[in-house]
Image (spheres, grey):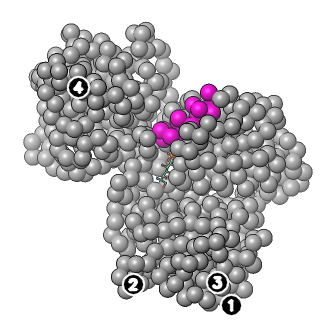
Amino acid sequence: MCGIVGYVGERKAQDVLLKGLSRLEYRGYDSAGIAVLEARKINLIKRQGKLRILANVLKAGPAKGTVGIGHTRWATHGVPNDVNAHPHADCTGKIAIVHNGIIENYLDLKASLIKEGHKFRSKTDTEIIAHLIEKYYKGNLEQAVLKTVKLLKGSYAIAAIHANEPDKVVGARCDSPLIVGLGKGENFLASDVPAVLDYTKDVLYPDNHEIITITKTGAIVKNYTGRVVSKRPSRIKWDIKQAEKAGYEHFMLKEIYEQGDIVGGILDERLHDGKVLFEELNINQGAFKHFKKIVIVACGTAYHAGLTGKYMLEEYTHIPCWVDTSSEFRYRDPIVDKETLVIIISQSGETADSLAALREAKRKGARTLGICNVVGSSIAREADGVIYTHAGPEIAVASTKAYTAQLAILYLLTLYLARLKKTLPPSRISYLIKEFRKAPSLMEELLNEHKSEYNNIAAYAGEFKKYYHEKHNKSYFLYLGRNINYPNALEGALKLKEISYISAEGYPAGEMKHGPIALIDENPWVVCIVTQSKTYDKMLSNIQEIKARGGIVIAITTEGDKEILHHNVNYLIEVPKIDELFSPLLVVIPLQLLAYYVAKEFGYDIDQPRNLAKSVTVE
Ligand code: AGP
């Protein structure tokens, strides 16, 4: 996934583009570049490496001009280097383009362009777009872009400039996000809202197969037949401060600490007099009564939220629920129909596999519901109904606040359906709501309490690092959980591996004897989720099995649990007491913090881990 920005206005384009790209760096950060129009010439500067490398080059030799485009890259085709960085130019150097997505038929297009004499510089799929615009340019950039995009297969969000038309930027999108920022005497194109929020809160959301021409005075959106499409501007409700670190060392730590607030905000927004409100749901209650099964589809952390959702939905609504990764669901000819509710969970709302899974579910006649964080994202707009998590922008690649926000929405959906289908008596529903309402303050308490000897997670991370090197870098992590906290074992492992690059695996604890126990010697650190639950005693037995084989145990247990003290665990982390149903909201916090502090100990780039991107908008 990459980030693109376009600008037309009165400001120095270079400053606007660099600022916009800095807000989009979470989308990709292996190279960056800008192209600025000045006196009918394009000044194109691009560099491998993080944005700050490009910024230093531009400090020494600024690009003048008030119209331009910019790009920050997560490489798909062509290694990250100066040549493969975007923007890309045509043969004449009069055209420059930036692109987020994958052009699947680029090799055929490239072969015919080479036959026609075009000279290519890079190994990217993107460069063919610049040469196609050059081929079709007859004095009108919008027309040339329109002819070009009709030939493209795959996903794209592009922005293009031409030296002969120095007052405009032309964009187009298909399956990659692109928004329009509407300013006074200036307008913007960008992959995501944070890139324009320093200048405007008014945005347009173009749909797939729409082309946008921005000038200083306006933004015109047309469909691919050339007809103007009117778009109602949306006003962004949050401000750019929420997309900044606000004094935290990393976005990830800030977003971990925001979780209590966000879950509290979700409850305040959606729970009124014991009733759950989903205004934007757009699926009527009657339909909900007739669903014979629920299928939850997602990737990564969102998938783990879905797995947790299965436990609550089946237990409290009695609707059979299965959970699938988007990439498996979309290729498996899934058995879904009009009596199936398919829920797609996606923070970005742009994950390629999840978007494809949504389309497959719709093709098969299922009703589809998106649980998304990014307003106006593709999944949010293409699903039959949507519930926004309103967690604010999640900048760190490792998802944290989006996960607990997704859990909160799933709990509310469970209560909503249980009331609708009368699978729970009102008294039970009010008890659960009362318990649920405790969660935000308990999350805050857990995050802000004084670091007692039990909860000194940063120190545990330091001890792991020492141990890791003593064991000649052979140590790793196993995460074990049961029932509704089993998905948290998977989530804890994912958090650790994606930011500390240390091998980590999550497992249902009951599976230990079916294989993983063979791994147990003094090497692995085994995180056991052993909070108060119906499977508490079983977890204690697992801990005994591990200790008997020399394993090191970090136990996550309920505050005040005395029994655990007799089980000789190496490290203890306590979470406040809450009904088992809601315990995943608390248990995940030490798992997130453990991953954070281990990665910090190893000195890695926590917000922008290697090889990853915030949203995987390519397959
Ligand atoms: C989670 O920390 C990862 N960044 C990744 O697994 C992520 O959850 C996954 O790519 C799904 O993203 P989405 O929620 O935007 O669809």
* C-alpha separation, residue under disc 4 versus residue under disc 2: 53 Å
Q: Which residues are magenta?
A: 350-363
Kindly report the distance in space between the C-alpha atoms of the residues bearing marks 4 and 3.
Answer: 62 Å
Q: Is residue 330 left or right of residue 367?
A: left
Q: Above or below — where is 229 with respect to 385?
A: above
Q: Is residue 148 above or below residue 61?
A: above
In which quadrant of the rendered view does residue 100 lie?
top left
Amino acid type of disc 4? Ala
Which badge, 1 or 3, comes first in the chain's sequence? 3
Q: Is mark 1 within 8 Å of ligand 1?
A: no
In the rendered structure, which amino acid carries the disc numbered 1? His
Q: Is residue 118 magenta?
A: no
Which amino acid, mark 2?
Answer: Lys
**How many numbered callouts?**
4
Task: Give the spatial CA distance, label 2 vs label 3.
Answer: 22 Å
**Residue for badge 2:** 471
Q: CA distance from mark 1 to mark 3?
A: 14 Å
- Describe the element under mark 1 as helix, strand or loop: helix
Is tag 1's residue or tag 2's residue first in the polypeptide sequence?
2
Local packing at callout 4 (Cα closer than 10 Å; few below 14, some 14-19, many 20+) is few
